[in-house]
Amino acid sequence: MQPKFRIRQLTVALAAAAMVGAIAPAAAKTGFTISSPTVKDGATLTLEQVFKGFGCEGKNVSPALEWKGAPKDTKSFAVTVYDPDAPTGSGWWHWVMFNIPADVSKLEADAGNPGAGKAPKGAVQSRTDFGAPGFGGACPPEGSKKKPHRYIFTVYALKVDKLDLDANASGALVGYMINANKLGKASFTARYGR
């Protein structure tokens, strides 16, 4: 290969990369996104979102969540919080909520508390790996401060009005049904170690 040809290839590649970089932020702004006014992507969870029990002394309050840009044919939403770093071999489901109506685009803080009455009408919160429905906050093993666990907050846009499941469904079963019916998803990740 001639040196001039290599320089030309490199110039074209750099120009293409610059164009993709210029287009990508615009595409991200118009896509399906999820955010929280209290938990930022990449941030450390506070005691507000830490579990109370299993040796943890948090407040166990699910954060407020907001989403926008869902696919146009969305008929319902599901929200999950999952820790892939839990020492179980299969991760840990911290929150599973589904059958959220398509006209809902946010959850209030503490919507994950089944007794608070803040979940959208018709939404179902099923069993987490703590053994009960509702939000179960972060509670990694002691000694995880140097390598904090990741907590992935995800909203799924679904092509069905309802998943035919109830509050006894496991996170894995709900995850299977979500993936079989999803039109799109949006996520952010927070961290926590102790």
Image (cartoon, helix red, strand yellow):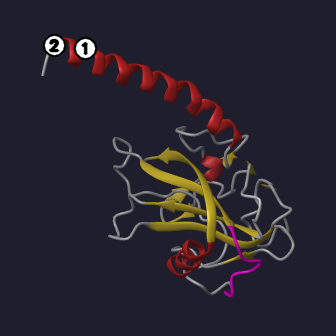
Q: Is residue 1 magenta?
A: no
Asked where in the image residue 77 lies, by quadrant, the reply is: bottom right
Q: Amino acid at mark 1?
A: Ile
The residue positioned 43% from the left and 26% from the top of the image is 17
The residue positioned 52% from the left and 78% from the top of the image is 176
In-image side of 188 versus 143 (left or right): right
In-image side of 97 versus 140 (left or right): right
Q: Is residue 14 above or below residue 145?
A: above
Q: Is residue 18 above or below residue 144?
A: above
The residue positioned 56% from the left and 74% from the top of the image is 128
Q: Which residue is mark 1?
A: 7
Tag 1: Cα neighbours inside 10 Å, few (<14), some, or many (≥20)? few
Residue 120 placement (x, y as % from top left): 84, 67
Does residue 107 appear anywhere in the picture?
no
Tag 2: Cα neighbours inside 10 Å, few (<14), some, or many (≥20)? few
Quarter in which the N terminus is drawn: top left
Q: Is residue 163 magenta?
A: yes
Residue range in magenta is 158-166
Residue 130 placement (x, y as % from top left): 53, 73
Asked where in the image residue 116 lies, by quadrant, the reply is: bottom right
Asked where in the image residue 131 lies, by quadrant, the reply is: bottom right
The residue positioned 61% from the left and 58% from the top of the image is 185
Q: Which residue is mark 2?
A: 3
Residue 112 placement (x, y as % from top left): 72, 64
